[in-house]
Image: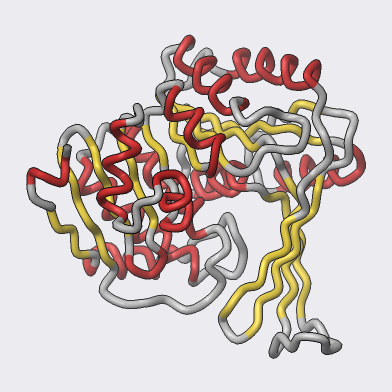
């Protein structure tokens, strides 16, 4: 069983327009709404692949009820923790194959609600082997909130995959996160290193068990105790990149639970991530694209110095 955690869950609203014009009026050609937030996207991908998963997170108000109903309709097992504040919304505008995203910050969470959620999460971990911790933290929580959850997971014998940024990322690493998955910008912000391999090495020295850095269309780099690899797709996929990183995290989580070796893990993560770009909404992957891309992902082992 995999458990995904989304502290700042959202209702994702996607608009499709022919073109995005600053200061202009737009006629929207289609609108879609669905439960979102990074951990929920991960759970949706895993569930559609038939992998046992439970999603949880903080939800509140009428928007929170919409999240619950949407995930029930999608047959994603969802055990949310209810808080007083209204759940946030995000808006993605897709035009000409590119996406512009507007992320609301969310409403504040109280210390008592967070303590309750930690207990709620602990109650979901009896049959879990891995916990995915994903996304931003809502206002009201300290930067060490994910570190709290890493410790809860470790206390229950679960490995952790952490996908966040800034001080929350660094605190989670210090708490012993097993795998972290920053993107290139988040890597630079956390380390000041422009080279992704050097930056990943720095995060490993800070305490991360393994670092998988997503580099957009250039693929991924994995720096682990077992070695260091760079994986690149053989072509660029156009579409909606929102949720591509979440699909990559889903592939990593599935592969870690299965005990797959790192070259296979990163190949799958790149293929799933690119296949998410070909799907219209975050939380989906185009399985045909994934299967075609898998064979074309080039995985290169880097020299031994890159492992240090």
Relative side of 49 to 204, left or right: right
Q: Is residue 65 visible?
A: yes
In front: 195, or 289? 195
Figure check: 154 above or below 246: above
What x and y, as percent, mark residue 106?
A: 79, 44
What x and y, as percent, mark residue 149?
A: 56, 22
> What sort of colour scheme is used for the picture?
secondary structure
Relative side of 94 to 48, left or right: right
In front: 259, or 222? 222
Residue 292: quarter of image:
bottom left
Residue 8: quarter of image:
top right
In front: 279, or 249? 249
Which quadrant of the figure contains the C terminus?
Answer: top left
Figure check: 114 above or below 140: above
In front: 265, or 155? 155
> What residue is drawn where x is 62% and y is 31%?
143
Figure check: 296 above or below 118: below
Relative side of 130 to 38, left or right: left
Single out the residue that lies furthest toward the front.
192
> What residue is drawn where x is 72% and y is 68%?
14
Residue 57: quarter of image:
top right
What x and y, as percent, mark residue 185?
A: 46, 57
What x and y, as percent, mark residue 60?
A: 85, 36
Single out the residue that lies furthest toward the top.
155
Q: Is residue 250 visible?
A: no
């Amino acid at each position: 069983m995999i458990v995904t955690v989304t502290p700042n869950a959202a209702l994702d609203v996607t608009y499709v327009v022919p073109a995005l014009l600053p200061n202009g009026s737009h006629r929207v050609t289609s609108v879609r709404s669905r439960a979102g937030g990074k951990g929920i996207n991960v759970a949706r991908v895993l569930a559609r692949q038939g992998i046992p998963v439970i999603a949880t997170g903080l939800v509140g108000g009428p928007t929170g009820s919409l999240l619950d109903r949407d995930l029930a309709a999608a047959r994603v097992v969802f055990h949310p923790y209810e808080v007083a504040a209204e759940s946030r919304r995000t808006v993605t505008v897709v035009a000409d194959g590119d996406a512009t995203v507007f992320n609301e910050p969310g409403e504040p969470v109280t210390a008592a609600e967070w303590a309750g959620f930690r207990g709620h999460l602990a109650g979901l971990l009896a049959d879990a082997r891995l916990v995915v911790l994903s996304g931003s933290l809502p206002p009201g929580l300290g930067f060490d909130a994910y570190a709290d959850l890493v410790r809860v997971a470790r206390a229950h014998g679960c490995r952790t995959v952490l996908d966040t940024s800034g001080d929350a990322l660094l605190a989670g690493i210090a708490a012993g996160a097993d795998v972290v998955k920053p993107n290139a910008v988040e890597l630079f912000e956390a380390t000041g290193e422009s080279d992704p391999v050097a930056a990943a090495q720095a995060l490993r020295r800070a305490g991360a068990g393994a670092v998988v850095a997503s580099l957009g269309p250039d693929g991924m780099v994995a720096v682990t105790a077992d070695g260091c690899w760079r994986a690149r797709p053989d072509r660029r996929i156009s579409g909606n990149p929102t949720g591509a990183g979440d699909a990559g995290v889903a592939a990593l989580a599935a592969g870690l639970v299965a005990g797959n070796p790192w070259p296979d893990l990163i190949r799958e993560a790149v293929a799933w991530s690119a296949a998410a770009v070909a799907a219209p909404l975050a939380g989906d992957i185009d399985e045909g694209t994934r299967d075609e891309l898998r064979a074309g992902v080039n995985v290169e082992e880097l020299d031994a110095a890159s492992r240090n």
